[in-house]
């Protein structure tokens, strides 16, 4: 398995959103929820319509699911950016509550991991990202930007279920140069 990187540049994130929104609103929604939730791709692809909307067809405030990898329950709020993406996506398709949120173009089955990889990778390449990018990039991008915005490392460690802060730092792609900058730029 190759190690992938987060998308560090916010301008590239915005550019990817524009590309995906212009080409396929489903892919735009997948990307938005992925980078704003920190979910693994296996958990994103298992989401059902009923996980994000209620019986009145209103976007829910929270998503509650059992993680595929750990079997643990995960419950978290849906942010405004993700709610908007879900709303924009769902008005473009017919659906039933038990259908996959991210449906394949080939019927009513869920989008496959390989297809999600292709979507994310092609969008990243289109905006000039040269680093290794994959489905896990969405989760790492969430962690990287949360950490950069001041979220405590111990909170991210718990959110990602990591054993140590050093594991979380490596996971979210904090490079030694970025860590060294703390020492070089502080100058008290």
Image: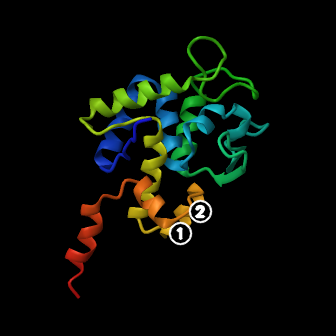
| Quadrant that contains the C terminus | bottom left
The residue that appears at 68% across and 44% down in the rendered structure is 67
The residue that appears at 56% across and 52% down in the rendered structure is 79
Point out the residue furthest to the top here: 106
Q: Is residue 71 left or right of residue 29?
A: right
Q: Looking at the picture, does residue 167 appear above or below residue 110?
A: below
Q: Looking at the picture, does residue 127 appear above or below residue 142?
A: above
Picture coordinates of residue 175 (x, y %)?
A: 30, 58
Q: Which quadrant of the structure image shows residue 55? A: top right
Point out the residue furthest to the bottom here: 188
**SS state under label 2:** helix
Q: Which residue is mark 1?
A: 154
**SS state under label 1:** helix
The residue that appears at 36% across and 45% down in the rendered structure is 5
Q: Is residue 16 left or right of residue 152?
A: left
Quick check: marks 1 and 2 in contact, CB under 8 Å? Answer: yes
Picture coordinates of residue 129 (x, y %)?
A: 27, 38
Picture coordinates of residue 151 (x, y %)?
A: 47, 67
Q: Which residue is mark 2?
A: 158
């Amino acid at each position: 398995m190759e190690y992938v990187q987060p998308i560090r540049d916010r301008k590239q994130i915005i550019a990817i959103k524009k590309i995906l929104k212009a080409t396929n609103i489903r892919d735009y929604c997948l990307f938005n929820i992925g980078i704003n939730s920190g979910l693994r791709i296996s958990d994103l692809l298992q989401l059902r319509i009923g996980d994000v909307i209620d019986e009145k067809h209103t976007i829910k405030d929270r998503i509650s699911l059992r993680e595929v990898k750990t079997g643990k329950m995960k419950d978290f709020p849906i942010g405004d950016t993700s709610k908007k993406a879900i709303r924009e996506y769902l008005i473009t398709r017919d659906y039933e509550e038990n259908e996959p949120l991210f449906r394949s173009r080939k019927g009513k089955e869920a989008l496959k991991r390989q297809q999600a990889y292709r979507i994310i990778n092609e969008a990243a390449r289109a905006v000039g990202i040269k680093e290794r990018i994959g489905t896990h990039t969405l989760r790492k991008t969430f962690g990287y930007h949360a950490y950069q915005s001041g979220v405590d490392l111990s909170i991210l460690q718990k959110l990602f279920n990591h054993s140590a802060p050093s594991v979380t730092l490596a996971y979210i792609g904090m490079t030694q140069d970025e860590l060294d900058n703390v020492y070089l730029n502080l100058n008290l």
